[in-house]
Structure formats: structure tokens, C-alpha cells
Amino acid sequence: MNLLNIVAKNASRNQRRSTLTVLSIAFGLLLLTVMMTIWRAFYIDRAGEESSHRLITRHKVSMAFLLPAFYRDKIRSLPGVKHAVNETWFGGQYKDDRPENFFAQFGTDPQEYLQVFPEFQMPPDQLLAWQHDRAGCIVDSDLAKKHGWKVGDRIYIKGTVWPVDLDLTIRGIFTAPTPAEALLFNNEYLEEGFPTVKGRVGWFEVLADSAADVPRVAEEIDAQFRNATRPTKTETEKAFQLDYIAMLGNVKAFLLSICGAVVFATLLVSANTMAMSIRERTREVAVLKALGFTRGAVLWLFVSEAITLALAGGVLGTFAAWGLVSVMAHSPQLALLFIGVRITLPTVLAGLMVAAILGLASAFVPAYNASRKNIVDGLRYVG
Amino acid sequence: MPPTIYLLKAMAVPIRYNFRNLLVRKGTTAMTALGIALTVTTAIFIMALLAGLREAFATTGDPRNVLVLRKGSTSELSAGGVSREAAQVLKTLPGIATDHHGEPMVSGEDILLINLPRKDGSGEVNVTVRFLSPVGIAMRPRVKLLTGRWFAPGHREVTVSQSINNRFKHANIGDQITIGNGTWDVVGLFDAGGSAHESEIWGDVNQLGIDFQREIFSSVLIRATDPGAAQLLQSQVRDDQRLKLNPMSEPDYYASQSNSGAPIKFVGTIVAILMAIGSCFAAMNTMYAAVVNRAKEIAVLRVMGFSQASIMSSFVLESLLLSFLGALAGITLMLPFNGMSTGTSNSKTFSELVFNLRMTPGVVGVAMIFALSMGLLGGFGPAWHAARQNIVEGLRD
């Protein structure tokens, strides 16, 4: 019987305790993995290659203020800029104001939109149809699936931000690498319905020639409009998302404090269990040592038992986290925040690593004490 | 059966027994209770955030006030608004209250967003600037001047809420704030009594109109003589075809913004429930160990005549005690954070919404119930096990 066998037998001899400990650790690790996934999605993950080439130019103060439409040509004429397209937030109501029926609607220019977003795939005939119908729109395939739309369907959207209602026909359905949950329509429709807005748009999406050009392009765009009545702020798509998250409040501190509480609580659970089971086995330890087991072997025996239990919890927890994250990514309340969020392998590995360290930390002190105990005292010990 | 045993059968195991047991195993007790305490802390933190947010919106608005937006709009920040002519018409409607000068209480207002850097370095965010006239200030009696003075009509001056002053740079008396192309002087601080105006900067609406050549108001706030008259005013404004306006009661307008807390609520609920389940298992573990270690004691108690029911309730009680200790520790840990101010994004205006953590009696009560249910769920199985164990085997152990 080798040592690993003893570890396995020891871990399974009080099955109720082991199960409860594993489950308790699993719930801790489930939470930790979800929090790490949110952190990663918010602060680390980069979208595809195109996203790193793309910038957003908006009004310096707030997206709520419009920019003159003629800025577009000025931006396009700068060296290093491949394409630029205007977008305007419509923010209307589809059917009713329930959150599950909410999705983003943008007015834009059908002639150039897909050139700025080359990762959106759509059949060329559908693009042509959209470009030729001023009351046409295109939708993301996820959104179309959710509402059961197909090409040719009519969609009615009530304006709340704008005093215009849209009566649109779906001309195309595009697929995006990460679901965009968006509808795009021709901005001229908005301008005809509400002439006051003519010549003004929400912001510009700018595609640069290369990632290396991005910082210079951003600077040049803002320099050009610095002294205009409507100055701009240009930043990468990622930086723009970070701004949005910053608006939600101190998300970093919120996530970190939850992670801290979870890890500490899990450590307590695991340490408690190990302390209890090691104390119960004081006599056994003395017997093992009398048989010739070294202190190191005894220490190793307990520590690996704790790590085994913690890892079992970790595996269960990360597996459950995978399910929970996919639920969150599809929840209507969080649609805007968690679209396309998923668990990645490094997150899983980090979670398992934390579990293993927790196991090690929880067993070390009681195991060390047990391994140092005098054999005679140990044999005399009555629980 | 001798009468003493008869008595014991109906008697509960003294609670002192449970106290002492928790004390004997103080290491285990402390660890389990601390685990529960951490869960309780997290739950309180989230509930206090939501309570503070709810309070900000629930305390804003007077039932006599009616907020008027353009037809189809649901937010003061929407494009288009109420024309100056329409605002004049509103002044002549029946049922409008007058102030002590005999002027109708109708306040044409404008909303703008500006960018200010947060003091904690977490970036620049949008802050709402409300432009109004002295009558608009009078219509919100909860808002009180703290230091300095109110902005003077006809001047580029603003008065800043205490919370904005606390959270943002460049918002002290004497500082200048850039709005559009002009600079406005900060001349005073106000306290909004925890209401949504806590997140605002106030300035003169007529000065803004001149600076920006604004011909419309984003909204008009009107005061009716009483809540009943406010209802009538609402239907009157809504039905007037030439006005094309959307009136709503001021408290309703602010209440509809409390969904700004939806992301916190969703994530928070998941976190609290998962942590609670984890702590429940931990409590169960501790209680099972307690039951197994005390097999002999339990058997002795049974031999003495204590009934299964009293053994069972004794162990459930011990588990409840354990979680009660945890709850107390958790509540104490969170107390220093009570009243702490924080911010999130307003779902209607996409600007900073300042609110305070509020450990209301409701929050503390729910946290206590939350902890005790963890104790109950965690203790039930072990207690059941204890009550049903075989007496002879227990004694032999």
C-alpha cells in the first residue's frame, strides 16, 4: 500500500464530512470563478483583431451630446484612417418597456457600416437590399433568433429619446463573433422624422490602418477639434468599455472584496475540517510514527489529503461556474454587461490553483503540529 | 416511572449545556461562526447598497409635484423638450399652487451633463447639472443650503451638493467648473437629505438659456395645491392636444429610476445565496462533528430520561446559537461602513448617481434571519442524527 492509497482511504473514511467539505469548497470556488470571469471580461479580455484597430470618437463631455456630421469627412481624410462611420443611439421601445424586450438600436450609414465592422458577416445581397431601402434595417443573428425574426419582417419601434417612431423592414441578418444584440437602421430615416437633428450624429466609429496607428490617430482627431464648439474625445473600443464600467461605480473594489470574503470563508471551512479530522487521528499518527513513518511523510499525508479534497471541490465549483456564467450571459437584466462573456481555461486553472493553495494552507498548521507530537503522548491520547 | 424522570422527559436540555459546548470547542466554534459572519457581511453590504439606492429615489419628489416632459419622452435627458410658450400655458392651468409672492409654482428646468474626475482616481464620469430658478429650489424643501450661498440669477454660478463635493475634484467653493464654453463659479454647497438631488449641481436656468441659446426646457416641474389636484393636472396636461406633453407624478418619475440598482441586485443575490449554501454545509460539518464527538453524552442524557425531541431541539438550538454568533460578528464588522457614500450609473441619465450605504433595521433584520436560517438548515440533519442514535451503542462507544 503506497502513500497515495492511504491518502485516498483517509479522505473517504468519513464520507459525510468529506462530502460536506467538498461541497462547501465547491460553492466558494464557484463564486470565485464567476467573479474572476467578470473581472477578466471587464478588464483583460480583448475582442478580436478588428477591435484593436477601431476607435470611438464622441463628444468630449458626454455621449449624450451630438457631434456635427461633417466631422466624419475630416476624420476620414486623416492619414492612417481607413474608414469612419456615424452612429446615433435611438434607444426606443420594442413592444413594451420590459427589460427582456430591450435591445440597442443605432442609426448609421449602410454604405460604410460593414467596412468598419468587417467581422460582422452578412450575405452581399442582403447588404445591397439594406443599402437600397431607406426604411430597412439589419439585426444581429442572436437577436433575430430570440425574437423569431426573419428577413422581410416588419419591426415597429417607439421612440422615447427621439420624438420619432420607426417602422422598419429587416433586410439582412448578420452574425458577429460575440453577440452584439443590436439593430442598425439608416440614419436618414431619423433625420426625416425629426429634421432638428439633421447634420448631427451621436458618435463616430473609426477604423485605423493598423494597431500601431491607433494612438496617433486618436490624438490627431482630438487635436483637430480641440478648439471647435464641440470638442471630441477619441479612444479605443476597449478604453471606451472601461469608461462604461467605471460609470457603474467602483466595480474593482466590489469584485475584490467579494473574492476576498469568499476565499477567506472557504479557507476557514477547509481549515476547520482538517483540524477536526487531524485531531481525531492523533493516536493513528503516533502508530504511524512508531511504525517508522518520518515526520515529513506524516505531514505530507495530511497535506495531500486536504489538497485532494480542495481540488475535488475546485473541479466541481468551476464546472458549476461554467453553467452559471452562461445563464448570466443570457439574462435580460444583465444583457448589456455580460453579452458574450464566457469562462476561459486560464480562469479555470487559476481557480484550481487557488483551491490547491487553500487546501495546503488549511492543513499545514494542524498537520505540522500532529507530525511533531511525541509518540508516547500520542498513543496515550483519548479523543 | 418515578416522577423526576417523568419531569425530565418533558423538559428541554438546559441551554447552558449548548453554551458550554460551544465554549469547549472554541476553535471550531470561532471558525464556523466567522465563516457565517463573512457571508452575513457580504449579504449586508449588498442589501445596504440597495437600501441606500432605494432611499435616494423614494425620498425624492413631492406627491403635489408634477414633472412635465415632451410627449413620448421618459427621461429629462431626451432630445427635445417643453417650449417656453408651453411652460407659460402651464402657469395658467387651474389647480396650480402659488408661492408667498403670489407667483405660480412652475419651474422650467434644464439638464446638462458635465465630466468631472472622481477623487478616488477611478476616472472621469458624467455628473448631472440641473438649471432652475429660485422657485424650483423652493419646490424641493428637502434640499437645504449648507455653506456659502445659492447661485445668483443672471450669473454664471453654481451650488454643488455635499456628496458631489465629497466625491469629485474641482467642486469646492471657489473652484470653477466648465460648462459648454463658459466657466461657472462654485459659490455654495447644499444638502439634499439623501434624495436623488444629492447627485446634482444646480445653476441658473436663464443664464444657461442665454449662454446656449436654448429655446426649450428639458422639463417643467409644476406644483398643484394638493395631491388630488395633481392628479387632475396630470390628466389635463396629457389630454391637451396642442401642448403635446407627457406629465407624470414626480415621486413616480424617481421611483422608476431605482432599477439603476438592477446589476447590483442580480449579482448580489447570486453571491449571497451561493455563499450561504457554502456556509450551510460548513455549519453542518461542524454540527455533525459535535454530535459524533458527544455520542456518549447524548446516550447518557437519553438514559437520564431526556426525550428524543429535547435532544433534537437542543442540537438545533446549538446550531442556531452558532449562527447567531456569526450574525452578530458580521453585523459588527459592517457597522463602520454604514453611511459610506458610493456611486453608480443612473439608468435614465447615464450619469453619476451618489448614494449612501444604509444599514436600516430592515437590512439588519433580514441579515439575522438569513444567518439563522443557515444555522437551522445546517443543524437540522445533525440534530436528527443525534436524536435517533442508538443509546446502547452510544454508551459503549
Image (spheres, rainbow, N blue to C red):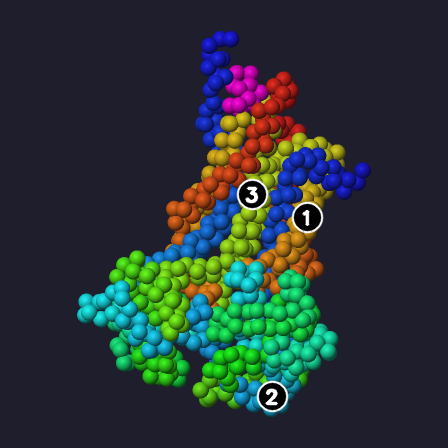
Amino acid carrying label 1: it is: Leu
Q: CA distance from mark 1 to mark 2?
A: 52 Å
Find out whether residue B52 is within the magenta segment. Answer: no
Q: Secondary structure at mark 2?
A: helix
> In the picture, which quadrant includes the N terminus of chain A?
top right
The residue lying toward the viewer, choosing from B344 and B316, is: B344
Mark 1 or mark 2: name the one nearer the start of the chain: 2
Residue A171 placed where, x, y %? Answer: 67, 74
Amino acid carrying label 3: it is: Ser
Report the residue at 60% width, 91% height from top: A77
Q: Residues within 10 Å of mark 3 (few under 14, many from 20)?
A: many
Report the residue at 66% width, 31% height from top: A283
Find out whether residue B307 is within the magenta segment. Answer: yes
Report the residue at 60% width, 23% height from top: B388
Is residue B202 shown to the viewer in this render? Answer: no
- The residue labelled by disc 2 is A76
Q: Quadrant of residue A213?
A: bottom right
> In the picture, which quadrant includes the C terminus of chain A?
top right
Residue extent of the magenta highlight: B297-311
The residue lying toward the viewer, choosing from A335 and A224, is: A335
Q: Residues within 10 Å of mark 2 (few under 14, many from 20)?
A: some
Amino acid carrying label 2: it is: Arg
Residues at marks 1 and 2 touching, judged by CB atoms closer than 8 Å: no
- The residue labelled by disc 3 is B279
Secondary structure predominantly adopted by residues drawn in magenta:
helix
Residue depth check, mark 1 versus mark 2: number of the one nearer the observer: 2
- The residue labelled by disc 1 is A316
Is residue B299 shown to the viewer in this render? Answer: yes
Q: Along the horizontal axis of the image, is A245 left or right of A363?
A: left
